[in-house]
Structure formats: C-alpha cells, structure tokens
Amino acid sequence: MQSQTCHLRVWHAATSRTQRGEFESRCERLLDQDELRSADRFRLATSRNQHVVGRAMARRLLGDLAVDPQSIRFDIGQHGKPVVSHPAAAQQPFNIAHTDGLVLCGIADQGADLVGVDVEATGRRTSTELAERYFSRPEVKFLRSRPAEQQKFYFLRIWTLKEAYIKAIGTGLHTPLADFAFNHIDSDQPRIEFLATELQDQRDWKFVCFQPRPGFIASAALAAKQPQSPVTVDWQAFEGLDDDADDQGA
C-alpha cells in the first residue's frame, strides 16, 4: 500500500514592532473576546501584535475559506499545546511561533502526526556559553568548528531546530535540550539523534530550516503518521491572504 503524503505549509507574516498597525487591526476582527482580552494583557506592543497576528493566522489558515474563522474553537491538549476542538473540518495539526517582527503559522494535512515551528531574529544575543549550557556536546563541537563569523547563524539554526522539536512533542522546556542532538546542521534538512532513551520513538521525523525573510531564521519539525511517508514543506508569505480574512470577518 502506498504511503500517505504528508504536507506542511509554513506561513509567515511581518508584525509591527511598535503601535498596532492596519494589518493587526484587520487580524483582530477574527479573534474571539477571550483572545482579545489575552492580547490586552501584554505590556509591550510588539508582544500584543504577535499574539493577535498568530491567532488570526491560525483561524484563517485552519478554516481555509471553507470554515468561518470565528467559529473555530481551541482547547488545550497534552502538555498545554493548543488544539482545535471545533469544528471537525478545521482539526488539523498546527503550530504558531513568533519573534519580534515576525510570526509563523505551520498547518499540516491529515498525514501529519506532530508539527512544530520556531523562528528567531538574527539580532538575538548568542554566545558559546549559552550553547554549552543548553546544547548537546556534538552540537557544541560543531558550533566551535565553524568560523567565528558563522557561529551566530548556526547557533540560531540549532536553537530553532530544538524549539521546533519540543513544540511539536508539546513538552516545552520540560525536555532538556541536551537530551537530543541534530546532525548535518549545515544542511537545510538536519537529522535528529535521540541521546535520552525516553525520547526515542518510531515516528518518521523531518526537519527543514529556512530564512523566511531577511533578518530571520526558522525551522520546522514534522512527524508523519505513517513511516516513510513522502513529506513536503512549503514556506509562504501570508500577505494577500489577509484580505480574504478581512472579508470573512467583516
């Protein structure tokens, strides 16, 4: 029997680092009252904008025009990871990530079991001391082998890979980052190695690294339901779709 194809689309959208802009205002129309109240608790405008845009992207993309974005209901799954509780047509694996100035939303088809995405700005502070504190020994060795001018780039690549994985499995930082390592880090499709026996599973993991926009580094993690399933990952700009979202929310 032919394996089911597994497809992940990762959408990215720029957000205002200061006051709420026109894009954020349109996104607000898709959110429910609880999400708006949660947004208003953020003290920094950039954090509020990221929350609003991330939730609006999830609603728009999970519905895919076939479902009213405002009809989607979210629940908290295992380890606190958000899942869609209603309607059934919008129940797809998804994950949201954000950093100052950019939001990602990964939506997978039903061939996927687990999905995680992460993004970091290239201006983020990094150091070999942080790597030694959080990374596995093979990753630290790889990082130190790179020329000094490349170490920041590869630190952020490793960091986003690790974050994407722990977000996919839903455990967050309850899983020590040194309990697993990535190989072929200089490739756009690194491979994971489990150093702790409790993490080992039979899932078919795929990791993809990408620079969605200048100044940002991102990674996506995807576990297919069926072993050896053909897996594809596409990265797409969200701009243009928000006009459709605005029409639906009007």
Image (cartoon, rainbow, N blue to C red):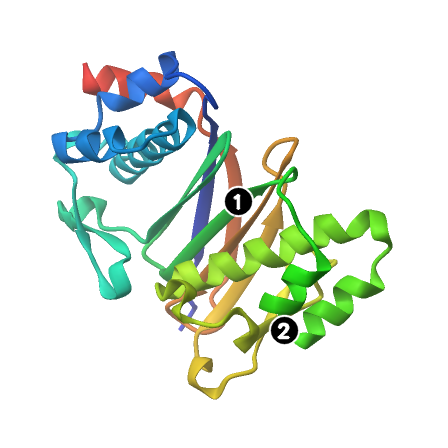
Q: Measuring 20% from the left and 29% from the top, which residue is drawn there? A: 36
Which of the pair 243/232 is nearer the observer? 243
Q: Amino acid at mark 1?
A: Val
Which of the pair 140/63 is nearer the observer? 140
Q: Measuring 44% from the left and 28% from the top, which residue is drawn there? A: 238
Q: Residue 80, image x and y in percent?
A: 25, 59
Residue furthest out toward the right: 147
Name the secondary structure under disc 2. Answer: loop
Which quarter of the picture shows residue 111?
bottom left
- The quarter of the picture where the C terminus appears is top left
Using the image, determine if residue 129 lies above or below residue 48.
below
Answer left or right for 99 relative to 187.
left
C-alpha gap between disc 2 and disc 1: 20 Å
Q: Amino acid at mark 2?
A: Ser
Using the image, determine if residue 136 lies above or below residue 211.
below
Answer left or right for 109 relative to 201.
left
Q: Does residue 69 show up? A: no
Q: Measuring 37% from the left and 27% from the top, which residue is drawn there? A: 49
Q: Does residue 160 show up? A: yes
User: What residue sits right under mark 1 in the picture?
Assistant: 119
Which quarter of the picture shows residue 189?
bottom right
Which quarter of the picture shows residue 55?
top left
Which of the pair 230/180 is nearer the observer? 180
User: What residue sits right under mark 2 in the picture?
Assistant: 136
